[in-house]
Amino acid sequence: MSGIAGAGGAGGATGAAVEARPSGLKRTLYLTEEIICILSLVVLALLPLAEAVARIFFQTGIPASSGYLNHFLLIAALVAGMICTRGGNHLSIALVQFIKDEKIKRALAVLSNLISASVATVLVWSSISFIIIGLDESRIGLVPVRAFALVIPVAFAVMAARFARRAVFTGWRRIIPPLVIVFATVLSFPVIAKIIWGFDPPDAAWDILDIFFDASFYLRLPVAVLLILAAFGGTPLFVVIGALSLFLLHAAGGELDSIPSDIYSALTTSSIIALPLFTIAGFFLSESKAGERLVATFRSLFSWMPGGIILASVVVSAFFTSFTGGSGITILALGGILYTILNGHLKYSEKFSAGFLTSAGSIGLLFPPSLPLILVGTTLQTNIFHMFVGGILPGLVLVAAIVTFGIVVSLKVKIPVEKFEPRRAFVAVKNSIFEIILPFFLIGFFATGVLSLVEIGALAVIYIFIVEVVIHREIKLGEIKGIFLKAIPIIGGVLSILAVSRAFSFFIVDTQAPANIANWMQGAITSPVVFLLLLNLFLIIVGSFMDIFSAILIVLPLLVPLAEVYGIHPVHLGIIFIINLEAGFLTPPVGINLFLAAYRFKKTFIEICRYVIPFLLIQLTVVFIVTYVPWLSTVLINLLQ
């Protein structure tokens, strides 16, 4: 996955080593949370399809199915967050890897975990207050809403304990993590007072509350700066965003328990259920031999033409990336077999092969059912089908540019073409037909309105499960749990950030900061062309430091008012955002795809940086074309309308 850095740095590695040998009781707890998370995800896959069948064939529905779905999403997201904490897999800015001094890395890891433990503790108490005071006696079917909501404080309590434990100390210093938990509990006094006395605490409590409000008001700027520095030091992004939301809201006179309220609202929104579903579908694809079959198929279809294997590689990479949502997974899953074909069998140079595959890994982000497209559509509150349609032409332009360069190189170095063998092509297509028709199958149901996006995601999971487990039998029943466990850290990492980003976005909007910045920009920069150029530069830098999901949830909402000022279509803005981040993944010295490619192709980081330069220049050229020709992103939408 692009831009992932496990929280905790070197200390995280130490903590992970401790967690790798759990005791009997701990193994039971681990197994319990894994079962709860997997079963919740299974419900998210099965219930929408059952609802669709009941609606289509029996003109009825399943009572309270929407409520159950939303609240099983809440459970799956928060338990996945617990599992993320256990392995140190929360999303963070990947700058700690550049620090060579192990002592500094360990110190940053300890500080990161202590900050995370304290923020999670405050969220525990805030969540309890929210459940007691903010939720009513309503039910989902037969289950009280409060019963579902209990997962919020439980999950944050487990996270707090795990973060504290990962802050490894020896000797008398072992008391530091518990003291941090106690200190965070003291900081939670405003919500603890509400739990005890409701909205009418005694005068002495009011005096203490006034001290808390005054302190948070005067400390808001230095604390915000320290938290931003902590983010660059490796602290999980969801912790930093959550802490900023808590502290700044309290400094503005708000209630701390409104943050868990926003988390609850964000994680019970049906539109995001598709995110974990497509993630699971992508991992089932990547863990099977679907990649090998597709490579064989497109090689048999296109290798008769100069550069045909380049086209085949781009198509297969785009297919995988569109389902997994992360170019890194594509590089790791397909990089080996494609590199062997390009460099080993066809004698493309190491430089070309490694550079091409590093860049090809992110092309599919613009094609449906790309997870970033879904998340951008949700964040922009625009039609997700329009996002799917809007990404097609820009994606094809990028594919055409990369393939054209590959054909030129193939002709220049005289790569031999292979004879087209109809029988070989027929057998290859037959073997991979289930994977080939999948995107058309899903988009057809979605475009015609037969199924909703959530139902499409559920259908993708069940379809791929049947194909890879039952028909091809490439995934054994005993391996299914392991595939879920590989997908869960990504699900937990993304949804944790999504949950706290909702609260932070509401706070930022309430301050009118985006609108004020937009007004200032309109006065300072009158040309939309100049604005778009600055936007490109900014987003490429963002893509170099952040994973695509974090960037969408944190940065994109801040750009919406600016885009409105300069008359940029929401779909065009979303496509600009994604294609710039794609280029950022390849930008030295910190583009995350460069590190993954160096690992996968067993090359030095400097070598990969050199190899990727021609492809980066091609991508930057396409970025500017897509940016300054909005027609590419909107013409198909206009035709549909």
Image: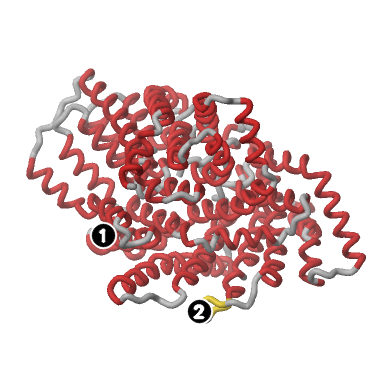
Residue at the image position 37 percent from the left and 71 percent from the top: 51
Residue type of the residue flagged with mark 2 = Gly
The nearer-to-camera label among 2 and 1 is 2
The x and y percentages for residue 571 are: 43, 42
259 shown above or below 55: above
Q: Is residue 156 above or below residue 616?
A: below
> Which of the two labelled residues, at mark 2 and mark 1, occupies the earlier sequence position?
2
Where 33 falls versus 364 (above or below)? below
Q: Residue at x 92, y 66 (%)?
A: 203
- Could you tell whether 410 is left or right of 69 in the image? left
Tag 2 residue: 141
User: Going 38% across and 53% down the picture, which residue do you hit?
Assistant: 283
| Farthest residue, direction top | 412
Confirm or deny contact between disc 2 and disc 1 (CB under 8 A): no
- What is the quadrant of residue 164 in the picture? bottom right
**Does residue 563 show up?**
yes
- 212 shown above or below 40: above
Separation of marks 2 and 1 at Cα, in angstroms: 34 Å
Amino acid at circle 1: Val
Left or right: residue 385 compared with residue 67: left
Q: Quadrant of residue 39?
A: bottom left
Query: Residue 534: where, in percent of width, then height?
Result: 54, 27
Where residue 49 sits: x, y (%)?
35, 68
Residue 168 seen by the camera: no
Q: Nearer the viewer, residue 611 or 563?
A: 563
Query: Where is residue 145 shown, x and y percent of the image?
Result: 58, 74
Which residue lies under the disc numbered 1? 467
Q: Nearer the viewer, residue 476 or 145?
A: 145
